[in-house]
Amino acid sequence: MTTTSTRPDVTRLLARFRDVRSRTDRLTRDLSPEDQTPQSMMQASPAKWHRAHTTWFFEEFVLGSDPGYRPRNPAFRYLFNSYYEAVGERHPRAARGQVTRPGVDEVAAYREDVERQVADRLAAGSLDDAALDLVELGCHHEEQHQELLLMDLKHLLSGNVLQPSYVDRSPDPDPGAGPDPLRWTHLPGGLTQVGDDGRGFAFDNERPRHRVWLEDVEVAGRQVTNAEWMEFIADGGYRDPQLWLSDGWATLQATGWDAPGYWRRDEDGWTTFTLSGRRPVVAAEPVCHISYFEADAFARWAGYRLPTEQEWEAFAASGDQVRGELLDPERCHPAAAREITLGNVWEWTASAYLPYPGFETAPGAVGEYNGKFMNDQHVLRGACAITPPEHPRITYRNFFPADSRWVFSGLRLAR
Amino acid sequence: MTTTSTRPDVTRLLARFRDVRSRTDRLTRDLSPEDQTPQSMMQASPAKWHRAHTTWFFEEFVLGSDPGYRPRNPAFRYLFNSYYEAVGERHPRAARGQVTRPGVDEVAAYREDVERQVADRLAAGSLDDAALDLVELGCHHEEQHQELLLMDLKHLLSGNVLQPSYVDRSPDPDPGAGPDPLRWTHLPGGLTQVGDDGRGFAFDNERPRHRVWLEDVEVAGRQVTNAEWMEFIADGGYRDPQLWLSDGWATLQATGWDAPGYWRRDEDGWTTFTLSGRRPVVAAEPVCHISYFEADAFARWAGYRLPTEQEWEAFAASGDQVRGELLDPERCHPAAAREITLGNVWEWTASAYLPYPGFETAPGAVGEYNGKFMNDQHVLRGACAITPPEHPRITYRNFFPADSRWVFSGLRLAR
Amino acid sequence: MTTTSTRPDVTRLLARFRDVRSRTDRLTRDLSPEDQTPQSMMQASPAKWHRAHTTWFFEEFVLGSDPGYRPRNPAFRYLFNSYYEAVGERHPRAARGQVTRPGVDEVAAYREDVERQVADRLAAGSLDDAALDLVELGCHHEEQHQELLLMDLKHLLSGNVLQPSYVDRSPDPDPGAGPDPLRWTHLPGGLTQVGDDGRGFAFDNERPRHRVWLEDVEVAGRQVTNAEWMEFIADGGYRDPQLWLSDGWATLQATGWDAPGYWRRDEDGWTTFTLSGRRPVVAAEPVCHISYFEADAFARWAGYRLPTEQEWEAFAASGDQVRGELLDPERCHPAAAREITLGNVWEWTASAYLPYPGFETAPGAVGEYNGKFMNDQHVLRGACAITPPEHPRITYRNFFPADSRWVFSGLRLAR
Amino acid sequence: MTTTSTRPDVTRLLARFRDVRSRTDRLTRDLSPEDQTPQSMMQASPAKWHRAHTTWFFEEFVLGSDPGYRPRNPAFRYLFNSYYEAVGERHPRAARGQVTRPGVDEVAAYREDVERQVADRLAAGSLDDAALDLVELGCHHEEQHQELLLMDLKHLLSGNVLQPSYVDRSPDPDPGAGPDPLRWTHLPGGLTQVGDDGRGFAFDNERPRHRVWLEDVEVAGRQVTNAEWMEFIADGGYRDPQLWLSDGWATLQATGWDAPGYWRRDEDGWTTFTLSGRRPVVAAEPVCHISYFEADAFARWAGYRLPTEQEWEAFAASGDQVRGELLDPERCHPAAAREITLGNVWEWTASAYLPYPGFETAPGAVGEYNGKFMNDQHVLRGACAITPPEHPRITYRNFFPADSRWVFSGLRLAR
């Protein structure tokens, strides 16, 4: 899946493998077995499942490439395959929360066992280039699932009347910290290039690098804030059909949405659910947990639009790359809106998730990684406050259906 | 809820309270936190929830009758109320499996706390007659939930590809043990009485005792067996619309049912899932996990019919009451079909679940116990292999919707 | 289907056959092809379909009993079979409104053709007793569909923003005409008999006549009025969960019902849709278009209950049978509430629709007429303002699911 | 909506208006009132509704722009508005088939009345430029609905067991007429322009004309044929998950699709439903009634891909524009696959339906025409055998959801 043409540095890869694996352990260290078992909706998965699935990925694609390998438990292949049709039948996605056995301890043992075997083979130098590429891919895959695990956990805990905390010692934000002022970066039109340049790891969907023609555009220096979103609400933004895509308006009617995900109008004003529990909405933070429909309607209301993913990438490449809030297990929440490139909240773009010209999938089951989802989804760019710090890059293409709100998703304006 | 007109024996009640409570603890002793958390369908509940809800019942109705009582946690009133509208808002039934906190340890502490307080007040004699009646009701209520807990657990575990066991040391049934031969008891018609006679505890739906006119009927001495059910299958019973109620036939088309619940046609013949895992169907055992639709179709195929609940009660009252298999935590499965009155499997009757003439509900929230469910459900009589031994009586009215199959349900024929 | 043991009077039957058939023609005379084509919900059928289906019934069961009979169009057997599994595959019920061909003219020709052949055979005396019984059954069947046709038409027209009329010259009711005062008839308990006595036509579900034991009961002399229902609404009847069956309360939450079917709160008060268009609710008329859930909740609110169907029949048999409003094509609407036995609105009873003791279905496909629907439905007794005058009798058992409101359904109280 | 900057030729516009209107009348001339009333699915509309809605469009936007205009019937505004939120409440889309009144005669009178008034104002020169543009738009709008009317009618008739005909005298295709051989057109990459050049009418979604960078591509000279599709079926194309988008595979599982829409495997081979009734699939014709999912899977199976809409437009602009089969009311079916630019079947492209850079909607309600549907739909290019001949152009963007099959949709390959 990677484009690295030279043999990776195995020592570095082993260290990285251990780092990634131990971060997953860190993230679930304080979760009870109960917290790790249910799924709160079809799109979400139990924490225990994420821990097992990321392990299965290494077992299936790295250890399993050895014909003599005997799986730890053949049933795990059925239970912890996510969507790889070529691998065989699998447990129904909507029923992941009903798998009580193996329990968390047995999953931990499964993790250790596979981890040790992969590490042994790395250390022994017994993996060929393809397998090394798959270890690298597996690390990025596990980082994706670290973010998903936290998104899914937040969604699960939010439904509990006790509004429980995952992060114990969340520092209260400084309510006086204002966001950066809104400034615009002008990008002159012309022929440019987007996509992975082959100098580091990238997913297949970032390739090939290719030419695109862009017209003049101005892109906002920072993300839209909660304060700005409250103006949109106050101005009746959720009640004016002229602002909305037809599917968006139908979604509003069906769901009753009148504010971002997790927001609640309490006696003293808007509050939101965070991984530190419920607390007031902070005006200076970027708006988070909005659907594509809401991002699109807000931009129209504001008299602007969303950037395309090509515009976004050209913007990100045009200046210094400043990183905002990324995953800190002691925080897991965006910081005030600054002039950053990557971080805080993912940014919905105007682009549908489609293959780049000349896109090709990898051979075998791992070819199902990205390509088959290129239908009726929307591209988000950037990264968010629960994205592992090693994970993002400016060519990265995240994607979700237009009505998704459990993502840490916001927006940046263009004109 | 009881009709006892004299003050109950408090010492006996305290002992019974402790027995019932400790049986719940015994039943969940070997379940992991993971096993106790999810629910496998809307009608089922997590084991943890059953443990908390039965405790809430005592807290709400017994301790809560003291105006000075302060609840352990006000949120529990929301989380663990099942369906009592008069008590206030409650957690959505379909989302019981998503409540990860309180965890099993906190639920255990909740149980101990409420239990101690109820026991203290019983021992101190500080409960009035109404409260004592509610303790008695709470014990019967908890026994109902012991059976539900095991039904729900069986349904949950059955969906796991590992087909795990709840009972470790299940003795294999003796495949040679034949059922009792099918004999018929003739009951001459005439005026008779059904319903609770007021000499012991009964639920409100068993009252008042009243007169009914019955015609001559013959009732089978034992329940229908798996062997007989396999004949029904082999004869195309599941494929002939003439045998089925219209709603039943529609259910078959929608579900694809072609055998009782948990049955699977494996290479060596029919197997079924039990609380000891998957094992071959035993011909001599009574058929179990069938819907009302299937019971009705089988009876029509056999040339007989189901008894009404009045006929069933007259039959049960006409001879010695012989008990079959009731709850044994080391077994949890029916025994071979014998000439018994109560036990092994619940028996679908031809009767809709409706109020007896002169039925009255108790005042207050506890009046919602039974009456409001008297619509489009069907009466089952008897008891089953996971019913606590103190629980059943011949006036007992169990009830479920016609398409329910996770109940330990079978049938007895009449003509 | 009839119990007549002697050969029916063929001359009388021919006259009756012609009367019934011509009333269907009269009822659809003024309907456009457009009015006769759609169905407004799954449970309802197009007028054109009712005209064809009642014809198919005679073709299938009377003409078709002659082995040499060649059907007019084999596709009609598929299109116009309602639910007879034994007859073969049939057009999906939910798609009856999409059958544009045959059109109304071709259906009229089909009606004439089959009608002429049946009449010829009747006149020629070439039908045997079984066939004559099926002609009689077909007449009663067509009368049932005359009522269904008008119910379904009312439901269809009610959804049109133009609120169109079926009856052109509807006399306005006299708003001053009060209902009869509410008086109670006392029925002493004891052994009584209910069901068809074999002296005239009856459906299979009214048989056999059998003994039942009834306790003392008082039954109201007239039906509940709109005025009384408005008190129930004003008293918050639709907002108090304690009054409702659990399924009923869930239905209220899902539908938002807060008044009977077709009622609307307009500026000048409640209006309702009638087959003469929308007009004010008349206080003195019996309440109409209520579900079983509402009838049950009203009775509980009023401190009374619904009679069982056995009590209803005993009441109806106890005095003179006074007929209220029955089908008059120039009116099609209830009159003010009087002390009547049969008419105005069907009356929900407390009874589930179940077989009488000893019930047997007829052999062959016609045995599917009633028996297979005996599940989760509720019995209504009496007749209504769109029931053909020859159709009702006091042993008649009508039945619908508990949430049905497009029936002309009301209630009578008991205590 | 048009970009015409000079005043249109009013005489030409009046003639065009009359031509378009009379074609609608021609298309529905032989349909019975029954045929014109139902809708066969939510996405389809009754023929009567199409006739009234296209009339409403002229009434609302042309006549209604005169403040003194009094609508013929205010309810029509509610009944015949399709989706214009700014115009007010409207009849639910899924219930269009239940509107029996106004009937077809009253709709015909409505058509004549509005038509006469528009023609009078055109002839009198009393319409300003904006209104003239709206007449032009209304003509194109009605042409769109002519195609929709036939698509919807085909879907409706196809569900009838009689498999009725709309076109009476359909000439049988010559089974020996082979398709053109498959040749490829090479298009060199570079900067090019797509979109409306402002020299004639265009919809807003075709504007503005803008620059795009394309890479080298080869586009097939003709559309994929039924013969080629039968190879795909025979090769197990519908059973191999590796060929399908994830949503497409899920759609196959849910629907059971194993061939194009309307195809049926009869004793003598594949047949399909046409507007002349059911007849054998003709190998030389282009495949029709396939979803985007199927087009995409076929292209993957064949080793090629779908062109993007920009590639398609560059291809169409690169040579002579050859027209294939367009709307002929006596045929309504594709001809054998030839080297054509526009006609026979619409061609799915690889492009999502999104706004062109700089896209702007018109002010007012008519701005809802296209823009609000730019979400999760896919672009089709070209035209089909039921597209009115004046309607298509190479910048035209048609769009439907990925699972749509009642469109006359096929595909052209690229590589």
Image: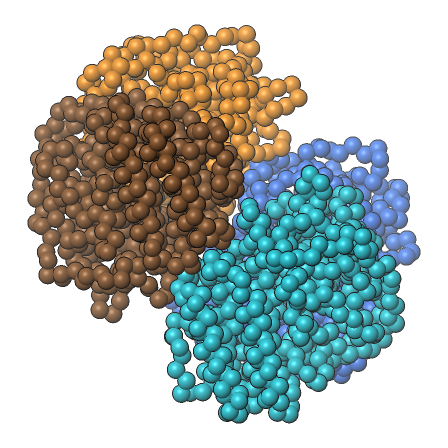
Chain colours: A brown, B cyan, C blue, D orange
* Relative horizontal placement of residue B75, taking residue D370 as reference (left or right): right
D165 and A256: which is toward the camera: A256
D225 and C317: which is toward the camera: D225
* Relative horizontal placement of residue B197, taking residue C306 as reference (left or right): right
* Relative horizontal placement of residue D116, taking residue D408 as reference (left or right): left
Residue D82, by quadrant, is top left
- Would residue A402 be visible to someone looking at this image? no
- Would residue B112 be visible to someone looking at this image? yes
Q: Position of residue D356 (x, y in %)?
A: 23, 30
User: In this picture, is A177 found above or below A121?
Assistant: below
Of all residues shown, which one is farthest toward the front? A124
* Relative horizontal placement of residue B411, taking residue A84 as reference (left or right): right
Q: How many marks?
A: 0
Q: Position of residue C337 (x, y in %)?
A: 60, 73
Residue B412, by quadrant, is bottom right
Residue in view at x 71 percent, y 32 percent: C73
B61 and C217: which is toward the camera: B61
C3 and B393: which is toward the camera: B393
Q: Quadrant of the C terminus of chain A?
A: top left
User: In this picture, is B346 found above or below C361?
Assistant: below
Residue C112, by quadrant, is top right
User: In this picture, is C119 found above or below C314?
Assistant: above
Residue in view at x 47 percent, y 74 percent: B111
Residue in view at x 78 percent, y 32 percent: C70
Q: Position of residue C92 (x, y in %)?
A: 61, 42
Q: Position of residue A58 (x, y in %)?
A: 39, 37
Q: Quadrant of the N terminus of chain A?
A: top left
Residue in view at x 76 percent, y 72 percent: B313
